[in-house]
């Protein structure tokens, strides 16, 4: 099974900072990677699919990159509303493995 | 598009859990559309459990495969997940979510339902 590893586990930054979260796959997954944002007590929200495609309605300060085994989620200018836990997910027609999450604090 | 999970709040160890996901705004008769189940223990990460595109096309988390069964009833717009031999470590919020195709991620989620396993 493919494993997904995120880093760091927790990230503390200031409003306006550029923030990057990493996600590594245990083997190549091409671009079959999504990023989700989850706030406490809520269901996750899809931000990025196909590694770098922005979901409709998601602010443009969010961007995704990478392919193969190394991926990133970048918030270009951190806002108070971005305080949340972020998850990467490898998805395809037969599985959907998540990373362990990165908590973003201000 | 809406999805909503329902089922017992409390189950006893060794019992079988049955959860239902009621969907609206899309049709389970559309073979492109799939529904996934995901769970999240309190304070922990998301864990993908299974997904279904039709009653002939299902996939399961390999570590839980022997305990899980997923099925759908398009006439009722429902997807059902059963998990056998429940244990306290299975205490979690269980979510269902939609996949618009086999090659797209989870774009719409239910609010989740907390299931506690305790005697």
Image (cartoon, rainbow, N blue to C red):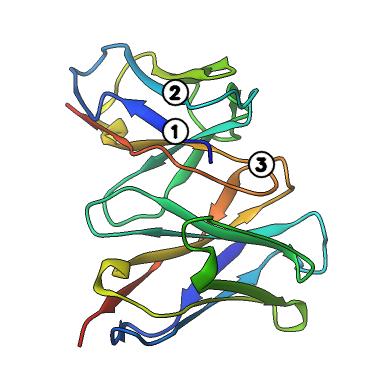
Q: Chain of mark 1?
A: A
The residue tagged with tag 2: helix, strand or loop? Answer: strand
Q: Are marks 1 and 2 in contact (CB under 8 Å)?
A: yes
User: Is residue B4 at least partly visible in the picture?
Assistant: no
Give the quadrant of the C terminus of chain B: bottom left
Residue occupying the point 61% across, 72% down:
B70
Q: Earlier in the sequence, mark 1 or mark 2?
A: 1
Where does residue B83 sit, x and y in percent of width and height? 47, 76
Q: Is residue B87 shown to the viewer in this render? A: yes
Q: Quadrant of the N terminus of chain B?
A: bottom right
Residue A24, numbered circle: 2
Secondary structure type for disc 3: loop
Nearest the viewer among A69 and B105 is A69
Subunit ID for the residue under disc 3: A
Between A63 and A89, the one lying in front of the other is: A89
| Among the two numbered marks 2 and 3 on one chain, the one whose residue lies closer to the N terminus | 2
Q: CA distance from mark 3 to mark 1?
A: 14 Å
- Distance of label 2 from label 3 (alpha carbons): 16 Å
> Disc 1 on helix, strand or loop?
strand
The residue singled out by tag 1 in the image is A4
- Looking at the image, residue B14 sits to the left or right of residue A1; the answer is left
């Amino acid at each position: 099974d493919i494993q997904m590893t995120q880093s760091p586990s927790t990230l503390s930054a200031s409003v306006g900072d550029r923030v990057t979260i990493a996600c590594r796959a245990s083997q190549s997954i091409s671009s079959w990677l999504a990023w989700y944002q989850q706030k406490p007590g809520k269901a996750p929200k899809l931000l990025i699919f196909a590694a770098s495609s922005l979901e409709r309605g998601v602010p443009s300060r969010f961007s995704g990159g990478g392919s193969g085994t190394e991926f990133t989620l970048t918030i270009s200018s951190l806002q108070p509303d971005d305080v949340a836990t972020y998850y990467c997910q490898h998805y395809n027609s037969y599985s959907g493995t998540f990373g362990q999450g990165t908590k973003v604090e201000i | 598009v809406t999805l909503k999970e329902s089922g017992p709040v409390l189950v006893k160890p060794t019992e079988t859990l049955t959860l239902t996901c009621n969907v609206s705004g899309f049709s389970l008769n559309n073979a492109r559309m799939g529904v996934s189940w995901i769970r999240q223990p309190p304070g922990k990460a998301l864990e993908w459990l299974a997904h279904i595109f039709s009653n002939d096309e299902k996939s399961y988390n390999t570590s839980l495969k022997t305990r899980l069964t997923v099925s759908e009833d398009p006439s009722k717009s429902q997807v059902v997940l059963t998990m056998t031999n429940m244990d306290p470590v299975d205490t979690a919020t269980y979510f269902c979510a939609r996949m618009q195709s086999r090659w797209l991620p989870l774009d719409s989620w239910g609010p989740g339902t907390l299931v506690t396993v305790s005697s």
